[in-house]
Amino acid sequence: MNAAKRSFLSSIIALIVIAIVYVTMPNYNLKPHGIVLPTHRHYQPYQGQVQLYHEWNSPTNAVNIGKLTVEYHSKTYNQQASMRALAKAQQLAAKAGGNGLIYSIEKTTASTPTGQAELIIEGAVIRTQSERKQ
Amino acid sequence: MKLIDLITIISFLTLFTGIVTLVDMLLIYFTKPKHALKKTNVLLDYSRSLFPVFLIVLIIRSFICQPYHVPSESLEPTVMPGDFLLATQYDYGLKLPLWNKTLIPIGHPERGQIAIFNDPVNPTQLTLVKRVIGVPGDHISYINKVLYINGKAAKQTFIKNTNEVFADGHTRAVKEYKENLDGVKHLIIVNPDAAAINFKDIVVPKDKYFMMGDNRDDSNDSRYWGFAPINYFSGHVRFIWLNATLSPFHIEWNRIGNRLQLHS
């Protein structure tokens, strides 16, 4: 067997092994990440659906219980990406005991090598008066 | 999405050259006549020569130490933009390259350490360097820019008025303090014009860490994206081996060799 055949055979085997290794490497799915920074005492997690508000239609009878931030990188801006980020925001707000979230959403470009889309949700987690009485 | 970083590329190069060399040696061993096998070509020659080099680099970078470049100002005044850090790779456990599985658990991030970890928001593309503030089980509060760990204030001592230096060279007036973080003393800077974002009693979950920059009012950290999981940690920063900027080219000689020792 000459050198060309040996190198061809060994290269094919090496590439097959690398392909198998690549397939078995863990996948990292881009998910929204965030946190609620509590401003007051802790509340029990809220079991219902967290209501979303903007600054202009926010309820007046509410107490601010925390500051929320969610960051999400995705390949492109689309409705699905916004919905995922908002769902995460609602989940965090509920876990912090809020039944409402006054939020704003910013679309920007992440400082990543591939310049992915970045969604940043900032907001105030609130608990409205009616819920606090229950 | 797969994590394709320098260690991944070196791992693949090591695998390729190693397998080519091994298969060729097996072919030579099991094939006759031997005299026909003495000839090699470029691929076989380079594989034999480079395999040990790639293997040594892979072992050093995966298990011993690795350099990191810091482009941002989030850890000022301890780490400046343009610093090149050397981090040991074994402090948080020896991890199998490519699969990120811990082979030998050695230790965990400890409060006050400066750690390298994958960005929880985008682990495949960004690596972050921050200080460990909260370890699992800790209760963290931040009131009027003072940290409270498990109810105990991290005492701050004013050092001087100074300037925050941005990566593009411009500066902003800030105040420098020495902070005693539960026995670990280090410097922080605070922007007196920035509003305090207070929070009370965050509990750090199991296997997660609360990370912050020393530049308290200009750091994208756990206050924005939450907790960093233990399996994202890779290195413990030990010292600065170089500080250099390319345009204009400048080397900050007095920062080279700074061991990031805690100030007493």
Image (cartoon, coloured by chain):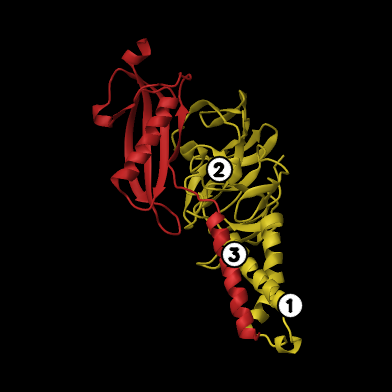
Kind of element beneath mark 2: loop
Residue at which label 1 appears: B30
Residue A127, quarter of picture:
top left
Which chain's colour is red?
Answer: A
Q: Amino acid at mark 1?
A: Phe
Residue at which label 2 appears: B213
In this rendering, is residue B68 above or below B173?
below
Kind of element beneath mark 3: helix
Q: Amino acid at mark 2?
A: Gly
Kind of element beneath mark 1: helix
In this rendering, is residue B97 above or below A93?
below
Characterize the local packing of mark 3: few (<14), some (14-19) or many (20 or more) Cα atoms within 10 angstroms: some
What shade has chain B been given?
A: yellow
Q: How far apart are labels 3 and 1 at the CA level?
A: 21 Å
Residue A62 at x, y = what percent? 33, 19
Asked whether the beta carbons under mark 2 and mark 1 sit within 8 Å of each other, the answer is no
